[in-house]
Amino acid sequence: MLEEALLLVVAFCGVAMLILAKQYHDYLRFSDEKSKSRYFISSALIITIMVILITVTWFPALLVLLSIFLLFVLFCATFSIVLLNQLRFKCSKEEEREVNGVKFTVCYGAPLNAWYNHCKKRVFISDRLLDVLNDQEIKAVYYHEEGHKVYHVILHASSLVARLWLLVISTLLATYLGHVLGLINVSLPVFLFILGISILLTCLFAFLTVFWSWINEHEADVYASRKANPSSLISALIKHCVHECLESEEVLLRNLNVTLDTSQISSSVKEYGFGSVFKLLLKTSVQKTFDVLGFLEAFKRPLPPTHPPLGLRIYKILNASSR
Ligand SMILES: [Zn+2]
């Protein structure tokens, strides 16, 4: 009986992941507004079936308090991370600037980044990022951030899924901790069955969270590549990636005026087939689920990676701008 139920959940997770990977792969190559409504339908269906499965197989009466407590701690951890980030991104000085017809705020003293401030309704770009970008690249970065505001439906969907992800991992951690603390009085096979199902469903939800947050980033990239020059956006992304790497090696280069020739970039980016997209999403989700089981990681970095790998971003920008 337990084996059959486990097989059923494995089959459900497998089919759901294949559907999401197929939708993401199609999205990378071509997408229209109609296909986006399909993402909402499939995600809503997956979440509904997951809720039914958790209710049927899990023992909420035993663990509901522990789960709520962990959820509360996780929300506090996420909130603290957001607060710490806001402190990191606090500007020692702000200055209004206009470059190539776009107006933004220069944030002095913040890390190498750009962001849209929803309270001030302005795009902020750090002085360190401005130091390494040319005017066309600044314009492209500005429109990427504006894209997050324009595609707010995708942004809200992605943050809703990320919140639900916290609920899912607190359920998984409660199951795990409930056993360690002796709160679950079930036989070992039944416990392993509950744990197995929790891990499978967490992997699936990580898959869904990654799917939405990566599409959120791609949408902002597509918007920017329509409003500005796609090759400027690609060179800005490459420069950001290179300088982040240099910063992690404690090399801070300022006022470095390098021009990248991205005219041949399409031959340098690999063609993403369905198999490689599926493997990438699966690897990211499984890795996050097992990181979370290490507890400390769940509180240090609760969310799966919000940005797709650079190769995928360039691949989508090239596909979107060739049409
Ligand atoms: Zn973004």
Image (cartoon, helix red, strand yellow):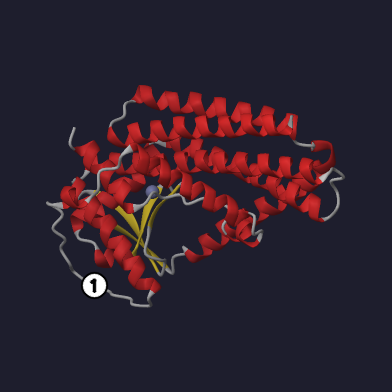
Task: Say what secondary structure mark 1 lies in.
Answer: loop
* Image coordinates for residue 243, horizontal then vertical, percent: 31, 67
Q: Is residue 288 above or below residue 186?
A: below
* Image coordinates for residue 290, horizontal then vertical, percent: 59, 53
Q: Is residue 303 visible?
A: no
Q: Is residue 134 visible?
A: yes
Q: Quadrant of residue 245?
A: bottom left
Amino acid carrying mark 1 in the image? Asn
Q: Is residue 154 left or right of residue 26?
A: right
* Image coordinates for residue 295, horizontal then vertical, percent: 66, 58
Provide the residue designation for mark 1: 255
* Image coordinates for residue 239, horizontal then vertical, percent: 26, 62
Front-lying residue, 172 or 217: 172
Q: Is residue 258 left or right of residue 164?
A: left
Crowd tier of the residue under label 1, counting other residues whose Cα lies within 10 Å: few below 14, some 14–19, many 20 or above: few
Q: Is residue 323 left or right of residue 155?
A: left
